[in-house]
Amino acid sequence: MNEDNLPEYSIIDHLNDLRKMIMHSFIAIFLGGALVFSAKKIVFDKILFAPLSTDFITYRFFCKISDLLCIEKIPITLISRQLQGQFTVHLWTAIYGGIIVAFPYIVYEIWKFISPGLYANEKKTGIKFIVTTSILFFAGILFGYYIITPLIINFLGNYQISEQVENYVDIKSYITNVRTTILANGIIFELPVMIYFFTKMGLVDSNFLKRNRKYAVIVILILSAIITPPDMVSQIIVSIPLIFLYEISIYVAKLIEKKRQTELKTYE
């Protein structure tokens, strides 16, 4: 499509579209949150509290890899120290859950908002963008839940400065850590998508990513060391997917650059 044939949008039109996008996204989050709020027993007992059991699937998997990774106990007792504590946790968990459940629709609304400024060939990638972004997000969610969260709970739950101190953990502290870890990993897994847009905007290129690969690997290893117990196996398990995502980002940047060069040759 020629640039002159793109529809003209005024600032008011853009603001109206932005308002609709935000409103529709909030409605989707509200509906998703209501669903999560109503499924209290499943969300807490079957999902969020599951990593507190040594029978959790991740612990059993680690135990099969090596006897050194077997989990004998997780000495954590959850308590609520405030009258409104459990209700507040329930409410905020529903909001976080609503964001996760509604994520594909939120991405769809974002695409609808930016698509008027795209060319016809770019608009055709809408479904791919929504599907890819959603898959990466949910892959990050699962990675955060099944890998990162159990490692953190196991390490911190068994960490002791003295045998005189027992872990009576506030429910708010536990749930906040689990929620944040899961959602943060969902966002981290969007790295290829972010690199896609950064490359399109000319902020980075494949050569920049290649040159800084060793620094990226060092940063990933440091992050892995911070969020995992102090053993090499756990750090490797966490770092491999992140390094893989970085390599995918380089590939994505290359594709954008090749496509840009092809378009330039066509116009010439």
Image: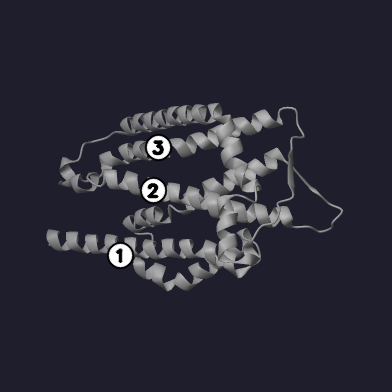
Residue farthest along the right direction in this orientation:
164
Asked which secondary structure carries label 3, the reply is helix
Q: Earlier in the sequence, mark 3 or mark 2?
A: 3
Residue at label 2?
135
Figure quadrant of the C terminus: bottom left
Task: Tell me the residue at 60%/55% (across/down).
Answer: 59
Q: Which mark is residue 254?
A: 1
Residue at label 3?
106
Q: Which mark is residue 130?
A: none
Report how far apart the C-alphas of labels 3 and 2 lie in the structure. Answer: 14 Å
Answer few, some or many: residues within 10 Å of disc 2's Cα (few below 14, many 20 plus, some between 14 and 19). some
Q: Relative to the observer, which residue lies in front, 118 or 93? A: 93
Is residue 223 visible to us here? no
Q: Position of residue 73 (x, y in %)?
A: 71, 53
Q: Amino acid at mark 2?
A: Ile
Asked which secondary structure carries label 1, the reply is helix
Q: Earlier in the sequence, mark 1 or mark 3?
A: 3
Q: Earlier in the sequence, mark 2 or mark 1?
A: 2
Q: Amino acid at mark 1?
A: Lys
Query: For the residues carrying marks 2 and 1, which lies nearer the camera in this image?
Result: 2
